[in-house]
Image: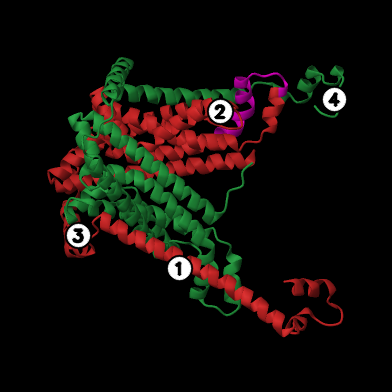
Chain colours: A red, B green
Amino acid sequence: MVALSALFLFGDFDAEPLLPAIHQLPEAQSRALLHTYRDAVAAKRRKAWLGFVVVAVLYALAARAADVRPGAFFAHIDNFTSYIVRILPHLTLSNFAGDMASWYWNFGKWLLLLGDTLLAAYVGTLLGAVGAFLLCFAASANLTSSRILRALARRWLEFCRTVPDIVFAMIFLIAFKSGPMAGAVALTVHTMGALGKLFAEVVENIDMKPVEGVTATGASWLQTIRFAVVPQVMQSFASYTLLRFEINVRSASVMGFIGAGGIGQEFIVAIRSFYYSDVSAMLVMIIVTVFVIDLLTERLRHRLAGAQAHR
Amino acid sequence: MIGGHPPHRPPGDVDPAALAARYPAYFRPSWRNRAKVGALAAAMLALLFLAMVRLEITPERFAAGLLRLGTYVRQMLPPDSEGRFWFFVEALVQTLGIAFAGTLTAAILAAPVSFLAARNIVPNIFAHFAVRRGLDVIRSVDALIWALIWINVVGLGPFAGVLAIICVDFGGLGKLFSEAIEATDARAGEGVISTGGNQLHRIRFALIPQVLPVMASQVLYFFESNVRSATIIGIVGAGGVGQYLAEMVRMLDLQPLGILVFMILVTVAVIDLISSRIRLAIIGRPPRS
């Protein structure tokens, strides 16, 4: 290294190009350089192999713990294809309308249940976002100097997002005694935790100059947040909330598995009772709904991002 | 203020009225904007109201439920595993196994497919569009639904859970991987091609070094979230602690339930900590202001 930089500093650039000069490095030095380089590469290789072995061992242990049986999988894979074939509807071209009608014989009710699922996701997302909005400022290090208040807000948010929403739903189900409300409240609590963390991260990355400016005019803590912080973070908040709505629609669709209403409840009944064509009918409805909502929110989020870029 | 006061500006320097006259747009309330925001808020509130009617959410029921919840929380105390502590540990290990085996298998399967879904590898718009949408369809089915389907194939137990996680993550990781591949710097690939390398060389020496750290951190992130998913996948009978959770909630067996929930919280927190350490080591510490 030293030899190279000396060459760079004192080499006679006008007289001859740099490259031949490197070739003229004294034998011992060039061998030392090469040695160092090989060592560095070998160390990197060793590290990569070590990582690979660790991951492979963990993988084997995990497969053992989770009872992974590739043999059983390949032996029974025809069950999967035959299951798919069985749930496929019987559609013919000659009587397409009639076949569709008999496939979706209960369309009105399923649509209503799907609507309930969407509404539960909506309530959970909206109220959860409001809760996260109220708490995220207290959880941000740059706005809240009280260590205790910050720790309280953060631990609470952590608890809310670590317990899976469906576990909350099970607990609320015994407390509220009925379906869809428990699901909506569970989504609210979980969303509050998940969004609260993201919101707090956004708030911690704001430009502090407007905050200082507003504080300098004698504004209170709340006024500072209203006029210096909220305008900076609102678009990111909206974008994260839309993303969360997509996730919540998916979660809400399975809330019914434990009895929390919506399309999931009807779906699990169909699966457990082997009403094959009903399974595929509802599955298609769920997939299409999730798909459309993903597309719409993605469009909205891009528009929000565009609006932010043009500010 | 060390080092004296900042230069003081005489109060007469700023005349609000003159400023308002000069920049009217900043001082006039924008009624159009206000109307827009107001209409949006009204629509959202109306939808919320509709939802509360449809889902039968009422303040009275909420209050009664909270009261009942308070009693249940009191019944969780004192925590008592009723001799099932080691069963819980075993189930938690199984849960971690499901999450790890599922995530890693999904990553191994998704990596080659994601190259097909990337615009800069497969320029044919129909090919990569079809792969993308296929991944989207797989992804839009929740893990619990996949678990139900796989139970029909391989029977009850954790293996069905692993297969369910593989399916969901195959869709999710395939999409994220292909986006990472599309976000790479094209110049490295052009460099490889210019020295006489072929397409495979380009992928091996220009693309993989760029995307591998991103992929690894995404896999870790999915692993974290799958530990959470794997705790509930047992509700439908696909292994892990979910089976115990569902059973104890149904039986109102609240003292061990408290222990189990606490154990899940600790496990998830530890996994998050380890995984975020590794993630930061892989991608480097993010710049913090």
1 or 2: tag closer to the N-terminus: 1
Q: Secondary structure at mark 2?
A: helix
Residue under the point 38% across and 24% down: B48
* Image quadrant containing the C terminus of chain A: top right
In which chain is the residue bearing label 3?
A: A
Q: Nearer the viewer, mark 2 or mark 3?
A: 2
| In-front residue for pair A163/B218 | A163
Label 3 and label 4 in one chain: no
Q: Secondary structure at mark 1?
A: helix
Q: Nearer the viewer, mark 3 or mark 4?
A: 4
* Image quadrant containing the N terminus of chain A: bottom right
Q: CA distance from mark 3 to mark 4?
A: 80 Å
Q: Amino acid at mark 3?
A: Thr
Dot 3 alpha-carbon crowd within 10 angstroms: few under 14, some 14 to 19, many 20 or more = few
Q: Nearer the viewer, mark 1 or mark 3?
A: 1
In which chain is the residue bearing label 4?
A: B
Q: Which residue is mark 4?
A: B5
Q: Which residues are magenta?
A: A216-234
Q: CA distance from mark 1 to mark 2?
A: 43 Å
Label 2 and label 4 in one chain: no
